[in-house]
Amino acid sequence: MVGLFKYPKRKLKKLIQEGEYEEAIALGNSMEPKFSDDPDFMFIMGSIYLIVEDAKKALSYFEKAFSLDSEDVEILSLKTNAHLALGEKDKAIACCKYILKLQPKNTEAQDLLAQLESIN
């Protein structure tokens, strides 16, 4: 049990796995000052907010994670999903294009980009 407190991100992930999202958010908020420059932590927090359908809050975490690690395709994928949830098609398209710049053969981004560009 000591490990969970020695490695607080593990505790956060465990709460998410258990579906304890409100508790995870509370823990994450208390950890944020210490982990404000940790893209993995920002990714985890954004993911929690995406799960509880608060895309605007999720996006703020994904933006911070992306500013810390602009080559992480997972961050970009979830950032794209947050933009879509907020109805921000153009920003989602930009994310897809950036993913394809990093990974030209990313079929998920290719397919989503094609869908989004076909919508008026």
Image: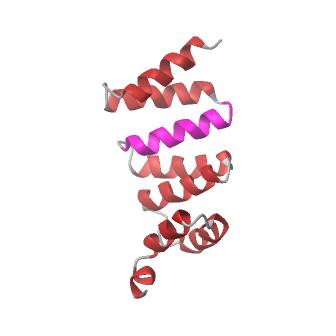
Residue 77 forms part of the magenta stretch: yes
The quadrant of the image that shows the C terminus is top right
Where is residue 71? Give x, y as percent.
Answer: 35, 42
> Residue at the spot x=41%, y=30% of the render?
98
Quarter of the image for the N terminus: give it.
bottom left
Q: Nearer the viewer, residue 47 or 39?
A: 47
Q: Position of residue 5 (x, y in %)?
A: 45, 83
Farthest front residue?
A: 18
**Residue at the location (57% across, 12% down)?**
118
- Can you give x and y, in whole percent of width and height, for residue 73 in the image? 39, 40
**In this image, 74 relative to 83: left or right?**
left
The secondary structure making up most of the magenta span is: helix
Q: Residue furthest bottom?
A: 2
Query: In the rendered view, would you say 117 is above or below 90?
Result: above
What's drawn in magenta, residue-wise? 72-87
Residue 34 position (above or below residue 86)? below
Display colour scheme: secondary structure
* In front of the other: 68 or 92: 92
Q: Is residue 7 above or below residue 103?
A: below
Q: Position of residue 86 (x, y in %)?
A: 68, 36
Q: Residue at x 55, y 69 (%)?
A: 15
Tally of marks = 0
- Quarter holding residue 45: bottom right
Identified at 45% across, 46% down, the residue is 66
Instruction: Answer whether residue 92 is magenta in the image.
Output: no
